[in-house]
Amino acid sequence: ANLHQKILLKSMKINGKGQASLIDRKKYIQIVENLKNPRHKLIFLIGLYTAERWGAIRQLKITDVYERGIDGWKVRDYITFDKLTRKGKTDNRQVKVHPDLKRALLAYSLPDSDYLFPSPTRLGQPISQDACDDFLRKVLAKLGIVGVSTHSTRRTSITNFYRQSGGKIAETKNFSGHKNVRALVEHYVE
């Protein structure tokens, strides 16, 4: 391997170590097309469009994303991530629903549960983090994609926001929910 490949391999996440790779357009299309379970696909998309960790996404309640209207459930303008589900956070986080994500949310068949992504085996509980890791690993292995993990959606979303903002750290920090600028700069913006 040449020097560039060695540096790339060193920085990629392999076997749970290293930094989660960014998801480019080609990988995004491959992954979305191969996630056949609508629940799995929506978890992935929420991660990419909100920059939230999958630990919080998997614990979303239906009412964090939808509200009951006269004609049934409708998608809220903002997704609310409860502080109790967010890694080390003391505040709830609200993220505006992107139009592409809204289409996916409108197409999703709501489960008969409080949770948007209920566990198939544990009544009244959300899907487990292990189950999320497992379904993503399986599709990545099938596609031969290395370095991507559940954290890749967060890293990709934050990096894309940073680039689209013209490199504005303060706006990116606000979008990502980071309290520490150093962590944001070291791990997310490229």
Image (tube, rainbow, N blue to C red):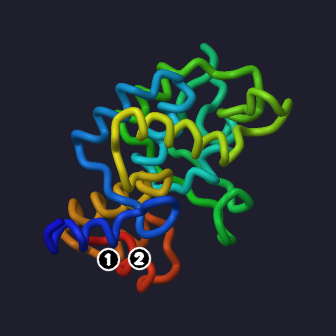
Residue 66 placed where, x, y %? Answer: 60, 32
Q: Quadrant of the N terminus?
A: bottom left
Give SS at disc 2. helix
Give SS at disc 1. helix
The answer to the question of whether label 1 and label 2 lie on touching residues, with beta carbons closer than 8 A, is: yes
Residue 61 placed where, x, y %? Answer: 70, 39
146 left or right, relative to 25:
right
Q: Amino acid at mark 1?
A: Ile
Furthest-front residue in this view: 1
Q: Is residue 164 above or below residue 99?
A: below
Mark 1 lies on residue: 169
Q: Amino acid at mark 2?
A: Leu
Name the residue nearer the viewer: 73 or 50: 50
Quadrant in the picture for residue 164:
bottom left
Residue 101 placed where, x, y %? Answer: 41, 35
Count of numbered tags: 2
Name the residue nearer the viewer: 8 or 128: 8
49 left or right, relative to 52:
left
Furthest-right residue in this view: 123
* Residue name at image x 35 percent, y 77 percent: 170
Furthest-bottom residue in this view: 182
* Residue name at image x 34 percent, y 56 percent: 156
Q: Residues within 10 Å of mark 2 (few under 14, many from 20)?
A: some
189 left or right, relative to 64:
left
Name the residue nearer the viewer: 75 or 149: 149
Mark 2 lies on residue: 184
